Image: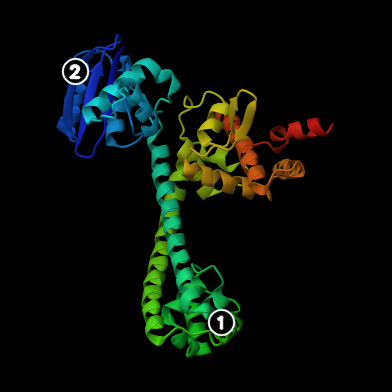
Amino acid sequence: MIFAGVDWAEAHHDVCVMSEDGRVLEQRRVGDSVAGIGELHALIAAHAEEGELVAAGIEVDRGLVVTALLAAGYQVYAVNPMASARYRDRHSVSGAKSDRGDAKVLADLVRTDRHNHRQVAGDSDLAEAVKVLARAHQSAIWSRQRQVNALRSALREYYPAALAAFGTDLAASDAVAVLAIAPTPRTGRALPRSKIAAALRRAGRQRNIDKRASEIQAALRADYLQAPPAVAAAYGAAARSAIRLISAYTTEIAELEHALAEHFEQHPDAKIVRSLPGLGTVLGARVLGEFGDDRTRFASPQSRKNYAGTSPITKASGRSRVVLARHARNRRLADALEQWAFCSLTTSPGARTYYGRLRAHGKTHRQALRQLANRWVGILHICLQRGHLYDENAAWQHLDAAAA
């Protein structure tokens, strides 16, 4: 076996090639280019005849460099930067750090401790495409929500009538349409019902237009404390900008969702994923994209649960023993799993019963959802490994056994 450490950077990569006995065979810096990656492969090929005999450590799990390493047939281990920082202390306690030294640490890490780290799996191109689109869609939603939060905070300072009219759902088409033409209290009070109704029609509303227009007009003309005119005008300009951004994000989110649905439906696992209660196109694509489709990645349901971050961790020392939730986890996957667990409460009788029993035993809503998500991850693993669609009775038969 030959072991390689690749300290990744944007412009170049430091490479260290190490033998089984820990001797450094080669160390070099290569460029982030086709020629540079060619040098990296030549450097390793001088000491290894086959790619399967090479184990490489790198601090990222995706990107063109990782793809090139996988294409060469290497065993690639994505090492968490926090973990590699701890390994660095084994080599030196002085606190010194260099890219060359980090490459050596990574090579030595996969030489001695690769069994404690997860090998980068070979997901299909379609699964990778679903992951990219799902993350872009989720990021757009998060970015839009940040703009909505900023807009709501601004409206509280100068335009409380708008909050009374639209509540907290400021990304809704009604709110965007009306606030775009009336971003200040003065313009809001002067807005006739006919213009409000016209704005609602342009936004796509088809029912109860006149009634809704009257409600909005009444809310905008109600008496509230007023900010000075100059301050209100400044806030209005800022609000108008936020509204345009929210509108643009909404359009992009719809386009990304369309592209995501197209790719997800083409995947052979989509039918199995969508058979589980609570998983539609968007959530199903997020879950599939974050887990990947390599069947060898997770050896057991528990392994998948650990990766998902839904399984608890135990801290035990002496007489002290405490069970805690995992906080170091994939945030995107955790968000999707929590939404999945919540949605399943209305579509799966078994999930609802399981959740109810957890609440009856003193679990909080979040704790019960997390434990339900943990259960769903295990069910998903079995369905994918066996290639079976979801079966409600088989999934929750342990509840009947416990009741008996």
Residue at image coords 63%, 50%:
343
Bin the neighbour count of mark 2 within 10 Å (Cα to Cα): few under 14, some 14-19, many 20 and up.
Answer: some
Residue 403 can be seen, yes or no = yes
Kind of residue at badge 1: Ile
Kind of residue at badge 2: Glu
Q: CA distance from mark 2 to mark 1?
A: 72 Å
The location of residue 274, given as percent across then percent down, is 57, 43
Q: In which quadrant of the rendered view does residue 112 lie?
A: top left
Q: In which quadrant of the rendered view does residue 119 lie?
A: top left
Q: Which mark is residue 26?
A: 2
Residue at image coords 45%, 51%:
138
Observer-nearest residue: 328 or 57? Answer: 328
The location of residue 271, given as percent across then percent down, is 55, 40
Q: What residue sits right under mark 1 in the picture?
A: 216
Observer-nearest residue: 81 or 192? Answer: 81
Observer-nearest residue: 349 or 357? Answer: 357
Residue at image coords 46%, 35%:
292
